[in-house]
Image (cartoon, rainbow, N blue to C red):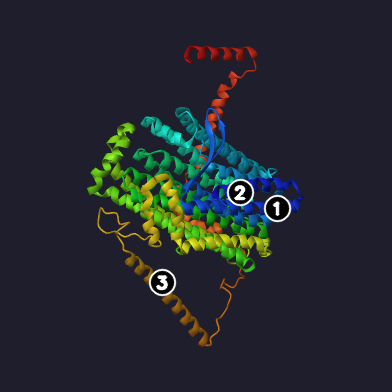
Amino acid sequence: MSSQTLMMTAFFLFLLGSLSTLTRRMMAIRLGHALLMMAGLSGFVAALLVLWSGTAWSLDLWSMAPFGMITLRMDGLAAFFILLFHGVAMPVALFGSSFAAGEAKPLWQTALLNLFFVAIDLVVLADQAILFLLAWESMSLVSTGLVLSRHEESPVRHAGFVYLAMTHLAGGFVVLFLLYLTVQAGDGHFASLAEALQGQVPEVQLLLLLAALLGLGTKAGLVPVHIWLPRAHPVASAHVSAVMSGLMVKAALYMLIRVFFGWAEALPMALALLVLGVGTLSALAGVYYALVEKDLKRMLAFSTVENVGIIVMALGAALVAREAGLAEVTSLALSAALFHGLNHGLFKSLLFLSSGAVYRASHEKNMDHLGGLIRQMPATAAAFFIGSLAVAGIPLVNGFASEWLTLQSLFYVGAFGLNADMGMAIGGSVNSGATMLGGLSSLNWTLVGGVLALLAAALLGLVGALAAACFVKAFGTVFLALPRSQGAREAREVPAVMRAAMALLAGACVFFGLLPSAGLRLTLPALEAVLGPTASSPLVLMDQGLGLIFWSAPGNLPISGGASAGSQLMIYAVAGLLMVVALLVAAVLTLLRKRSGRAPVVAETWNCGLPLEPTMEYNATSFATPLRLALGFVGRFAVERDLYRPFADGLLRLAQRMRPLQGGNVHIYLSYIFATLLLLLLFGR
C-alpha cells in the first residue's frame, strides 16, 4: 500500500472516529480512541515510507479560482512532522481510552480530538495558502473547544478567552503574510509564494518575515507572546494537554522552518540574530517560571516554553550559519532543532500523561499537597522519572543528544564569528543583509553574531542546570517523602491501559537516548526538503553514532575530518568500559556489605524529640525559594503585568475617548458612510 493511500486512510479513520461519538457513551469513547489509534498507525507508516524512500508525493484535490489548485504534498519535512504527530497519537489514544471516561464531556473531547488530528495533519500537508489557512484556523478552533470542555468553571473560560485572543492575533499575522504573497504571486501554491517572497525588495521581505515570525511564534509559545500557553494547557485534560504541548506548537515550528529555510534564500543577519535572541529569552524565561511554579501542569506548560526556546535557538544558529556561508553548520543546527522537536514531543507527552495519572489518582495538581506516590504508583513514578531525565538533558535519555548538538552548533557559530581569518569571507555576505537596516549597516555583524552565539551557548548551559533543578523539585515533591494530603495518601496506581501508554513513550525516550543516530537519520529527508544538496553533512554524524565533534585546527570545520571513525569508536569503548567498571565496583561493595552480616539500622530522623509531620518536609515552594531569591531580578519583570496590562489599559482609554463616535444617531452614521465613499472616490483610483 502506498504512502498516499495510507495517509488518506488515516484521514478517513479520524473522521470516522469523530462520528463514532454518536453511539452509546462508553462504546463511543472506546471506539473513538480505537479509531484514533488505527489512524495514528496508518499515518505513521505513511510518513515512514516517505522518509525511507526519500520520494515525495502530491495530491490535487480541486481547483479554486483565483487561488489555483488545492493540493496536498508530503515531502521529507512534512513526513518528519507527520511521523511525530502520529507516533504520539497512538499512546495518547491508548491513554485517553481509559482516562477520558472520567473527564467532563468525554464524547465532546473524543470527537474534537479526532478532528484536531485532521486539522494538524492538513497544516503540514497543505501545499497551498488557502488550504493552509483553513487548516490553521480549524486547528485553533478545535483546540479551543478542547480547552473549554469544562466551560462551567470561570478559570477555564478565562483561559479559553486568552487562548482564543492570542490565537486570532497569531492568525492575523499569518493571514497577512500569506495573502500578501498570494496576491503578488497570482496563485496560492507554496512554490509560487516562495518565488514571490524572494522577489520582494529587502525592506518588504523583512516586514513579511517579521509578520511570519510574530504569527507563528505566538502559536509556538515564544516569549513574550506565550501567555496563552501556561493558561490553556493546565485546564485541559491530560491527554489533550499532551497533544497541545507536544504537537500543536510543532505545527507552528514546521511552518517557521518552511518559510525561513525553504522560501527565504537569504535574510539579514540581524533577523537571524533576532531569532536566536528570542529563542534564548524564551528558554530562560520558560525554565525560570517552571522552576518557581507549584502547579504540576503549569510547570510542564512553562517547560514547553523553555524547550520551544531551545528549538528556536538551534534554528537561529542555523540561520546565522547559513548567512555566514557555513553549509555544514547550517545542516547540523537545523538537524538539532528537528531532533529536539521530536524528542520534546515524546518526553513532554510522557510527562503530561504522567501528571494526568497523578491527578486521576490523587485529585491534586498542587505539588505542595502531594508526596510519597512512588510507593502506591511505582509505574507512574518510573515513567515520570524517565521524562524528567529527558527534559533535564541527562545522558542516555533522548533530550541530551539534541541539546548537545544545539550546544555544539552555537559553539561553531561563535567560533567562526570570532575568527579573524574568516572575517572577510563572512563579512561580505552578512553585511550585505544589514544594509536595509540603515545605521546598523556599519556594525561588524560577524563579530556580533559570534559573541551572541557564544553567549547563547553559555545561557543554554544555565537553562539545562535550571531544568535539572526544576525536575528534581517536581519528582521529589510529588513522588518522594511522605504524603501531604488525604488524596496523596489514598492514591492508587492507574489502570494497565494508561500505564502501557506511558511505557510506550518512556521506551521511545530511552530508545532515542541510546541510539540518537536513529533520530538523526529521520531528520535527513527533512533537511534535504528545505536545504537541498547542502544537507549531506549530518550523514557523517549519523555514521559516527552520537556525533561528537572535535576541533582539528582553528578555522577548520571538523564535521567531516576532525575525528576519525576509529577515534569515535575509542571514545565509546572507553565510556562503556567506565560504566562496566562502575557497575562492578557497586556489585562488589554490595556483596561485601551482605557478607559482613551487619543489618542496616533503620531509625527515625532526629527532630529534637518531636514527631515528624509531612508539613515539615521540603515542598515545591520551599525548594524553589533559594533559586527564586537568587534570580530575583528575573522575577521582578512579569510579562502580563509589565507588558500586556499597560497595553490593555491604553486600549481601554482609547476606546473610552472614541466612544462619542458611536452616539446612536443615525444621521451621524450616514455621514460616516458618505465620508468613506468620498475618500474612496478621491484616493481609490
**Mark 2 and mark 1: span between their CA atoms?**
15 Å
Most extreme residue toward the front, as rendered? 1
Q: Amino acid at mark 1?
A: Leu
- Tell me the crowding category of disc 3: few under 14, some 14 to 19, or many 20 or more residues within 10 angstroms, Cα based: few
Q: Residue at x 32, y 57 (%)?
A: 560
Picture coordinates of residue 43 (x, y %)?
57, 51
Q: Decide which of 645, 573 is in the foreground and name it.
A: 573
Above or below, 439 against 507 in this view is above
Residue 356 figure quarter: bottom right
Which residue in the structure is indicated by mark 2? 10
Q: Amino acid at mark 2?
A: Ala
Front tag of 1 and 3? 1
> In this figure, which residue is indicated by the disc labeled 1?
31
Neighbor class of circle 2 (other Cα within 10 Å; few <14, some 14-19, many 20+) is many
Disc 2, disc 1: CB below 8 Å?
no
Tell which circle, 2 or 1, labels the residue nearer the N-terminal end. Answer: 2
Residue 372 in sight in this render: no
Q: Which residue is mark 3?
A: 576
Disc 3 marks a residue whose amino acid type is: Gly
